[in-house]
Amino acid sequence: MCAPGVSRHYPDRVRRVSGGLLVAGTSSDAGKSVLVAGLCRWLARQGVRVAPFKAQNMSNNSVVTPDGGEIGRAQALQAAAAGLVPSVRFNPVLLKPGGDRTSQVVLLGKVIGQSTALSYRDRKPELFQTVLSTLEGLRAEYDVVVCEGAGSPTEINLRRDDIANMGLARAADLPVIVVGDIDRGGVFAHLYGTVALLSPADQALVAGFVINKFRGDPALLRPGLDQLRGLTGRRVLGVLPWNVDLWLDAEDSLSYTADGVVGRPRPPVGEQWLRVAVVRLPRISNGTDVEALACEPGVSVRFVTEPSRLADADLVVLPGSKATVHDLEWLRRNGLADAVADHARRGLPVLGICGGFQMLGTKITDSYESGAGAVPGLGLLDVEFEFRRDKILRRPDGFVLGHPATGYEIHHGTVVDQPADGLVTLSDGTPEGVLSGAVAGTHWHGLLENDEPRRALLDWAAGHAGRSGFRAAPGTSFAAAREAQLDLLGDLVAEHMDTDVLRGLLAEGAPSGLPVLPPGAP
């Protein structure tokens, strides 16, 4: 397992609660997603029927749901925490940035077009109706719906059209708790300021705070907690400690450690390490694919952004991209394209996933995503791609290097003539992807989460890299690692939050008479 054994803190079964809650944050990456997952796990293991919900997510990390759509990966993880299969209802609006000013808009799992930041505003009223009706349906079906906000609720320039934070809370009468990341510094100012810049009507729903990623003696924090309550009239409902084992399913690859290391590398079971360099593309998509590699003992995985970091790598991975042609041009501009090609010419292994697979081919014809027309690829695989308007969303199964596997596909680019030497053999015998010596590619996301295929690919990579002393550990289970992390999140909620107050908020909503902090936006 990737995470070590964790305590199983299962409180006595509690009375059923009903209602909803919105978890807002002082900023992006403050801890909203993991706190929602922890709340879902805490409630689910007490027998409460709970579902996650994020009205609007902006992320290029997504999954294909069994009901045939596409949602943010964080909501899929939250669904797993609640014991549910992913559904498009858990994330009705998904924005997938393809550039600094444009995003693909996905509504209930299906693409409905592209929008700029300004044109998206015109679509919000219609989207909000879908958001509210979807949430209403979930609240009728489940005891509790735990909602996740987006970014900060105090984006005062966007409040008028907000559909994910206080706009949602007001429309659905949801109590709100605000989480802040103390590791960034200034958490008390962030929490106070988040409330103070809200209108009085919005402030009335903010019922408390959570401090995330605290390191040290909680006694040192107590005076600040007391002062914050005195200043705001709201309690800190929990102080969640920093935990090094919480790293799987990061919403953003930038949230990894400063030197780009993924996970917590453990010593090899053989005599040698296998060093993996993952190119962190500007528009990386589903970079979480490589986290399963980092779960393996003796596998060191790093995100890299410049050519010298490939010099001592054994395996190079080109991950998915939401802007394949633009990211390919970025590879060429900063010298990484030459470094990847040199790596392959030396007989060392290269793996491309989705957009990375497309970059490895001889030509990309793209009249849809970038409008660039015909663009030469890296030429490391003898295959061409054509981008089409209709997005492919599917959850196939088959075999990888002789082992059963499942995955999911999210892409506009398609293979023009599928080579016979596929990396994957679908259940009907059709090849998918390409395996040519030390270079391989596939459109499958999630492939590396399959334990036996992952170990077979590591053996393939070690063989081509000359790492005869590397041996894949036989007992690593990615699914068990993810479950251990979800249980750990549930433990943190049970042990470090005032769960009686939480149950009260879920059953009764925000308390009346909460103070209004100045200045209080109009």
Image (cartoon, rainbow, N blue to C red):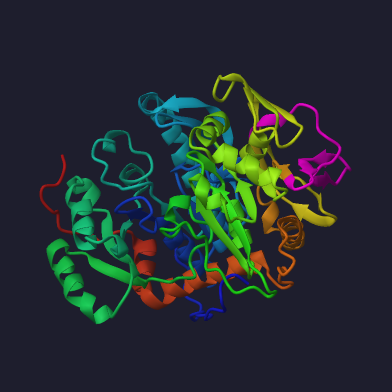
| One can see residue 140 in this view | no
In which quarter of the view is residue 243 placed?
Answer: bottom left
In which quarter of the view is residue 266 placed?
Answer: bottom right
In which quarter of the view is residue 362 placed?
Answer: top right
Judge whether 111 appears above or below 316 on screen.
Answer: above
Identify the image quadrant of the N terminus: bottom right
What residue sits 40% from the left and 29% below the top? 101
| One can see residue 320 in this view | yes
Identify the image quadrant of the C terminus: top left
Give the x, y percent position of residue 453: 76, 58
Give the x, y percent position of residue 5: 57, 79
Give the x, y percent position of residue 240: 36, 71
**Frontmost residue, 516 versus 292:** 292
Q: Which residues are magenta?
A: 411-439
Judge whether 17 appears above or below 260 on screen.
Answer: below
**Frontmost residue, 135 versus 493:** 493
**Frontmost residue, 306 versus 383:** 306
Give the x, y percent position of residue 58: 45, 41
Q: Is residue 433 magenta?
A: yes
Q: Is residue 133 left or right of residue 339?
A: left
**Frontmost residue, 473 versus 494:** 473
Of all residues, the one furthest to the right in this rendering is 429
Q: Is residue 486 left or right of residue 200?
A: right
Q: Is residue 279 magenta?
A: no
**How many marks do you count on the picture?**
0
What residue sits 48% from the left and 80% below the top? 11
